[in-house]
């Protein structure tokens, strides 16, 4: 009986972890700070977009956008404005209203009324379904308001993607180049349909 007790005690001791094998207690996680945020003074998030930024006027202007809580290590930004309520050519593609990539990592926003052209004053590139220019919202009066979505991505690199054959090809190339480099994302929405 004693030998059985000894064997059991010996087996128990062999299975005890040594002090060096014991995992240290986990340190408490640092509280997460606020995430990347994009805003405009032109309308509250989720509210109606004023007409001057839309196709309801002959020459719509881009809204002023600002962002805060930029993740550490951000080298550049990509802004993707699109209308997810539209399907292009029976595909999952949405309408590109403004894609801006290569925005410098030190930027804190874009001013109102960005110029037309391949490159913006800060060196970033732009494209939309209307060409190399901001395309204001233009949902038809007959139907529901559309949700124009502004997505801002903070990247740990600067992507150098040339313009493609069209805005859909360019967007696909930009989104592919972003994969694996996204440090943060912010989303803002504006609603619009043309006046009656």
Image: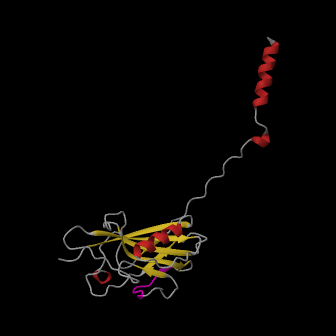
Residue 142 position, x and y percent, is: 18, 71
Residue lying furthest top: 1
Which range is magenta? 108-116
Residue 69 can be seen in this image: no
131 with respect to 101 (left or right): left
Tell me which residue sits at (71%, 44%) in the image: 23
Tell me which residue sits at (20%, 73%) in the image: 141
90 with respect to 117 (left or right): left
Residue 3 can be seen in this image: yes
**192 within the magenta span:** no
11 with respect to 63 (left or right): right
Q: Pick the quarter of the image with the N terminus.
A: top right
Q: What secondary structure do most residues of the magenta stretch adopt?
A: loop
Q: Quadrant of residue 5?
A: top right
Tell me which residue sits at (42%, 68%) in the image: 187
Residue 172, compared with residue 13, is above or below; it is: below
């Amino acid at each position: 009986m004693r030998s059985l007790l000894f064997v059991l005690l010996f087996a128990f001791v062999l299975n005890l972890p040594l002090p060096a094998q014991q995992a240290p207690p986990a340190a408490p996680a640092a509280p997460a700070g606020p995430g990347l945020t994009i805003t405009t003074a032109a309308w509250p998030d989720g509210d109606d977009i004023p007409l001057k930024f839309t196709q309801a006027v002959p020459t719509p202007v881009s809204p002023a956008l600002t962002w805060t809580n930029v993740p550490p290590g951000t080298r550049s930004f990509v802004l993707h404005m699109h209308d997810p309520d539209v399907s292009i050519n029976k595909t999952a593609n949405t309408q590109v209203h403004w894609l801006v990539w290569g925005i410098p990592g030190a930027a804190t926003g874009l001013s109102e009324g960005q110029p037309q052209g391949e490159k913006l004053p800060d060196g970033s590139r732009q494209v939309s379904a209307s060409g190399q220019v901001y395309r204001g919202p233009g949902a038809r009066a007959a139907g529901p308001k559309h949700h124009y979505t502004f997505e801002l991505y903070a990247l740990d690199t600067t992507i150098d993607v040339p313009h493609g054959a069209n805005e859909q090809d360019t967007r696909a190339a930009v989104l592919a180049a972003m994969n694996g480099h996204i440090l943060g994302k912010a989303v803002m929405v504006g609603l619009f349909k043309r006046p009656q």
